[in-house]
Amino acid sequence: MAEYGYVAALPELVALASREPADWFIAHTQAALPVAAVAAERWSARLGFDCEDLLAELGTDPPEIVRLIEKTYLPRCDYISVPSQCIADRLVEQYNIPRPLVLYNAFPLRLAEGLLPPNRRQARPVIRLHWVGQTIGPGRGIEEAIEAIGMLGDGVELHLRGKLAQGYDSTIHALCRKYGVASKVILHPPVDHDDLIRTMGEFDVGLALERPENPNCSRTVSNKLFAYLLAGLAVAATNTPGQREVLEQAPSAGFLYPAGDAAALAEGLRRWIKDRDALRAAQQSAWEAARDRFCWDREKEKFLRIFDLSSSPTTQPVSLKRQ
């Protein structure tokens, strides 16, 4: 009943997924788990799950149903991948399963082709802070970033890239007037995904302002953080468990501060405004961390090691539970 209530067109999806033989059937969301499990059973194949989010804790899906599906199918999976150690810890704690594989949601190196390493870039008179997201709107930390640059005086700009949420322009204008930074906040339109990281070469510091209130979002690592690293931007990030996990592995690439504390954000940025050598060192550290560790070119090797590529495909179906 839970599956039929949660998964739209469940019988049709099962039929489609079961139509072609495969060695692995991999679900990408909790709703896909029942579908992939039946298809895997039909073809005597292996079952995998790429757990992008803890949907039971996201606030968008019915938690009882999500947890029931996870409890039923996660122990059956031959592998589970997650985007952070924090989410892996949570699943092990809840379901007593083998530790999932952490695959960071990082980008391929090719998306940064054409960018100069930070130690070969020209210094700018004004430090340009950069925040990127699908939507420029409330609850994203933008308010405290505007407040922070109001504390820093001259020598700093805030650049926001994304689609402006309806009505949020008035909020930005009001904040800019309040903190006297109208000329220092610049909006940029969205660009194509494949071009985004190359546009970051004109900025200095990437802002990863994730909120800690949502248990799921605070445990994951936003892909904007990996984009900043790949582009060679120093990073100012809120001290969420997921972001702390990454910056503890690349501590010289940036700093963490308590979410909601604009003064702490300003203080961290002030050090780079006063010491441009320290800023350049953080940028170069970010650049190197992305190439040594935090890029898909490295992460994919962990993913590919899961699969036994020498095994022959299974082509004989076994029992199908749902018709």
Image: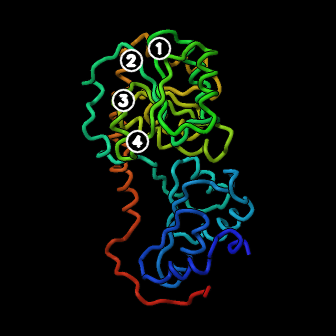
Task: Return the residue nearer the eye: 16 or 30.
Answer: 16
For the C terminus, the quadrant is: bottom right
* Mark 3–mark 1 distance (CA, rounded to whole Å): 16 Å
In the image, residue 46 sits, relative to residue 167, either above or below, namely: below
Q: In which quarter of the image is residue 21?
A: bottom left
- Whether the residues at callouts 2 and 1 have beta carbons within 8 Å, the answer is yes
Residue labelled with disc 4:
191
* Mark 2–mark 1 distance (CA, rounded to whole Å): 8 Å
Q: Locate residue 233 relative to residue 319 in the image: left or right.
A: left
Q: Locate residue 84 relative to residue 228 in the image: left or right.
A: right
At x 32% / y 40%, what residue is drawn?
A: 291
Q: Which label belongs to residue 271?
A: 1
At x 26% / y 41%, what residue is drawn?
A: 113
Disc 4 secondary structure class: loop
Residue labelled with disc 2:
278
State which mark lies toward you, 3 or 4. Answer: 4
For the N terminus, the quadrant is: bottom right
Q: Can residue 56 be seen in this view?
A: yes
Residue labelled with disc 3:
285
Q: Earlier in the sequence, mark 4 or mark 1?
A: 4
Q: Which of marks 3 and 1 is nearer the N terminus?
A: 1
Q: Which of marks 4 and 2 is nearer the N terminus?
A: 4
- The amino acid type, in three-letter code, at marker 3 is Ser
